[in-house]
Amino acid sequence: MTMSDAAWQALGLSIWVSIWATLMALPLAIAVAWLLARKDFFGKTLLSALVHLPLVLPPVVTGYLLLLSFGRRAPLGIFLENTFGLVLAFRWTGAVLAAIIMGFPLMVRAIRLAIEAVDPKLEQAAATLGLPAWAVAWRVTLPLAFPGILAGTVMGFAKAMGEFGATITFVANIPGETQTLPSAVHAFLQIPGGEGAAAALILWAVVISFGAIVLSEWLAQSVAKRIAGT
């Protein structure tokens, strides 16, 4: 199971894309999860449905919608390129966007459940001390919900590592530019003798995903013990 230069490039690009996607999605995922968990407002059901829509849409459809919205001839694509010099379609930056869209619902769901598990009475007690809402969330809610936030982060990272359908539709499968690990595995399996390279990439995917889960579990247990004062 030897690794070619193309395989190493695909592995490195997948890790790079996954890190960027996770870091960019996490702040918004926390904000949306807190909003859904702690606030009642008109359109809450609609917002929740929109957040979770990528989970039920075929990934290829999501990728096609991204292409229609952010392609180089699409209004948003033209605006981003002319204003910021940012091109998404058929670039690694587009792979990041696809990974964000596909992983965001998983992150929001895990974080929302963690926030809902925090006793509201603790937040009310902090509010009676004069803390504004943002301070209560920052000092009380989020620390107590940290294990769930960590779980959501790992789920988002894992989804980004394994994202295939939306990515290949939006940014294609260009070696060295947009070919992520799943795309490379698919490409290697289409050529004679490519099974070894595909197996090596699959093994790396298992190792990285397993390591991320173990690390998140260890951190979550450490935080839980610290909160419990043990």
Image (cartoon, grey):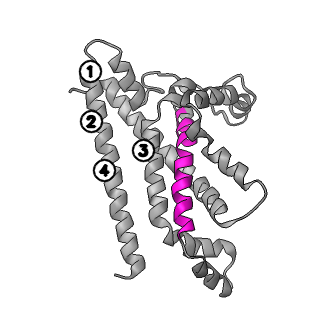
Label 1 or label 4, whichever comes before in sequence order: 1
7 sits left or right of 125 in the view: left
Distance from Cα at disc 1 to Cα at disc 4: 24 Å
Identified by mark 1, the residue type is Glu
Distance from Cα at disc 1 to Cα at disc 2: 12 Å
| Residue displayed at 70% across by 65% down | 39
Q: Secondary structure at mark 2?
A: helix
- Whether residues under marks 1 and 3 lie with C-beta atoms below 8 angstroms apart, the answer is no
Neighbor class of circle 3 (other Cα within 10 Å; few <14, some 14-19, many 20+) is many
Identified by mark 3, the residue type is Ala
The numbered mark at residue 142 is none
Q: Which residue is mark 2?
A: 203
Quadrant showing the C terminus: bottom left
Neighbor class of circle 2 (other Cα within 10 Å; few <14, some 14-19, many 20+) is few
Prevailing SS of the magenta stretch:
helix
Q: Is residue 88 visible?
A: no
Q: Which residue is mark 3?
A: 158
| Residue displayed at 36% across by 15% down | 190
Q: Which residue is mark 4?
A: 211
| Residue at the farthest bottom position | 129
Q: Quadrant of residue 61?
A: top right
- Whether residues under marks 4 and 3 lie with C-beta atoms below 8 angstroms apart, the answer is no
59 sits left or right of 84 in the view: left
4 sits left or right of 137 in the view: left
Q: Which residues are magenta?
A: 95-117
Q: Secondary structure at mark 3?
A: helix
* Vertical relation: 9 (above or below) 212: above
The numbered mark at residue 195 is 1
